[in-house]
Amino acid sequence: MHRYERQLRNVGMSKLHGLRHAYAQQRYLELTGWKAPVAGGPASDSLTTDQRTLDKKARAVISQELGHNREAISAVYLGR
């Protein structure tokens, strides 16, 4: 990790955690067909029952792909 961070600094880049946010939001769009709440999509409380089911599944997939086991972590990237 230190090598990676040093290489980023050498080319003038840092704080690439935003790439994880971008990935999560793009993946959410791919899996659900609509933008994540944090990106201007509908809030969870405005979704239909079927959409909520899909939302929950998408969040679980994204959380796992990002190396987490808790959906609450994906909420940081996607919003509610």
Image: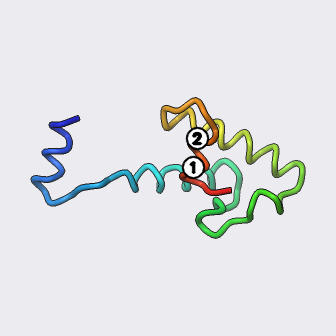
Q: Nearer the viewer, mark 2 or mark 1?
A: 2
Which corner quadrant of the image does residue 73 belong to?
A: top right
Label 1, secondary structure: give it.
helix
Residue 45 spot, x, y in % from top left: 82, 59
Quarter holding the N terminus is: top left
Name the residue that disc number 1 marks: 27
Classify residue 45 as left or right of residue 22. right
Amino acid type assigned to the residue bearing label 2 in the image: Ile
Q: CA distance from mark 2 to mark 1?
A: 7 Å
Amino acid type assigned to the residue bearing label 1 in the image: Arg
- In the rendering, which numbered label is found on residue 62? 2
In the rendered view, tell whether residue 11 sits above or below residue 73.
below
Q: Nearer the viewer, residue 66 or 80?
A: 80
Residue 6 spot, x, y in % from top left: 13, 45
Classify residue 45 as left or right of residue 73. right
Which corner quadrant of the image does residue 64 belong to?
A: top right
The image's colour scheme reads rainbow
Crowding at label 1, few (<14), some or many (≥20) Cα neighbours within 10 Å? some
Residue at (53, 50) in percent of width and height: 24
Residue 41 spot, x, y in % from top left: 68, 66
Q: Earlier in the sequence, mark 2 or mark 1?
A: 1
Q: How many marks?
A: 2
Residue at (66, 47) in percent of width and height: 31
The outermost residue toward the right is: 49
Quarter holding the C terminus is: bottom right
Label 2, secondary structure: give it.
helix
Q: Nearer the viewer, residue 8 or 72?
A: 72
Crowding at label 2, few (<14), some or many (≥20) Cα neighbours within 10 Å? many
- Contact, mark 2 vs mark 1 (Cβ under 8 Å): yes
Q: Nearer the viewer, residue 4 or 72?
A: 72
In the rendered view, tell whether residue 1 sits above or below residue 58.
above
Residue 28 spot, x, y in % from top left: 62, 51
